[in-house]
Image (cartoon, rainbow, N blue to C red):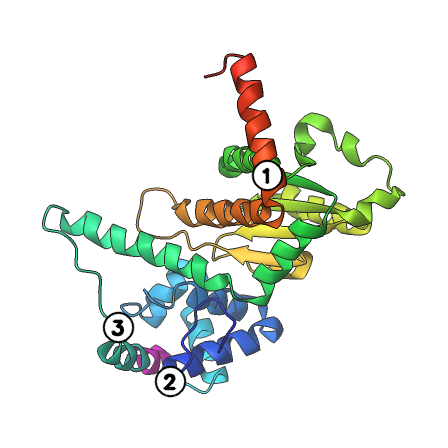
Amino acid sequence: MSDGFASFPQGPLGEFIGKLEQALPSLPKQEAKIAQFMLLNVQTIGPETGKSLAERVGVSEITVGRLMRRLGYNGTKHLKEILRQHYSVGGRPIVPTSDINKYLSKTMESEISVIRSVFEQTGNDHWRRATKLIEDSHKIYITGFQSVRGLAEDFARRLSIARPDVQYLSPHDGMLGEWLDSKNDRAKHECLILIDVVPYATEGQELMKVARRQGRSSIVVSDEYCHWSSDLADAALYAPSNTGLFLESTIGLNVILSLLTNHSATVDREGSKKRLASWKKNARRLKLF
């Protein structure tokens, strides 16, 4: 299996992941939420029960069982056996250093698993579409709401150094003045990148619909609970966020955005170098640093 959120080319676990990916587009909404969570957290769901999975995703325990039966498995006990077999054959847990306490060691393993999950996505179709859209679009709009607005603004600044014509879009502040000409032929060469996490901002989904109606392509970068992004966006990238911290982890989102920026810079290396040099020159002139 060359594509997917996680790549296990052989064995029962690879077969299970393949079934999840194949079934995901046609699953009922509640089962799709469970399937999405499993795909993004396949390396850490071993200790979970049907009840705990249901609680984490916000569905009923019956829904978990229904999904497993639909895929041809006898509940989460069957999944535990598959995971046990896979990791006993080829898996090796991270060995923490002695100066990290038990709680932080567990958190560290979860965070590292998130990073690994992001890198494993770089071979799938959604990642290829996202990078292609960023390459081909004449203009990129970036937006984010609530707690990730700052992350979106930072990404817009970084991406604007790697490539031209990048703008942070704030519908609340600008009232979409940038998009008033709905018949603008340039829209088909523009792309909206939305960054959003639970609880999802209603504005985000509505903004995606406006972008689509006006002919823009779109990319969503979100967490593992986002089951609607693939319905609205041309490309949907996911970053697991539940690692046991007080608030959801944003390390995966940061990795995705950093990789997208880096990819954009590699498309025109000389141009990116010149832009970086110009940025440094402007910063010195303004005595920012």
Q: Quadrant of the C terminus?
A: top left
Q: Find disc 3 in the rendering and name its residue.
A: 91
Nearest to N terminus: mark 3 or mark 2: 2
Residue 238 drawn above or below residue 61? above
Number of the front mark, 3 or 1: 1
Q: Secondary structure at mark 2?
A: helix
Callouts 3 and 1 close, C-beta under 8 Å: no
- Type of amino acid at the residue the image marks with label 2: Pro
Residue 261 drawn above or below residue 15? above
* In the image, residue 87 lies in the stretch drawn in magenta: no
- Type of amino acid at the residue the image marks with label 3: Gly
Residue at figure coordinates x 31%, y 80% from the top left? 77
Residue 223: percent from left, percent from top: 48, 53
Q: Find disc 2 in the rendering and name its residue.
A: 12
Direction from residue 167 to residue 162 in the image, left or right: left
Q: Find disc 1 in the rendering and name its residue.
A: 272
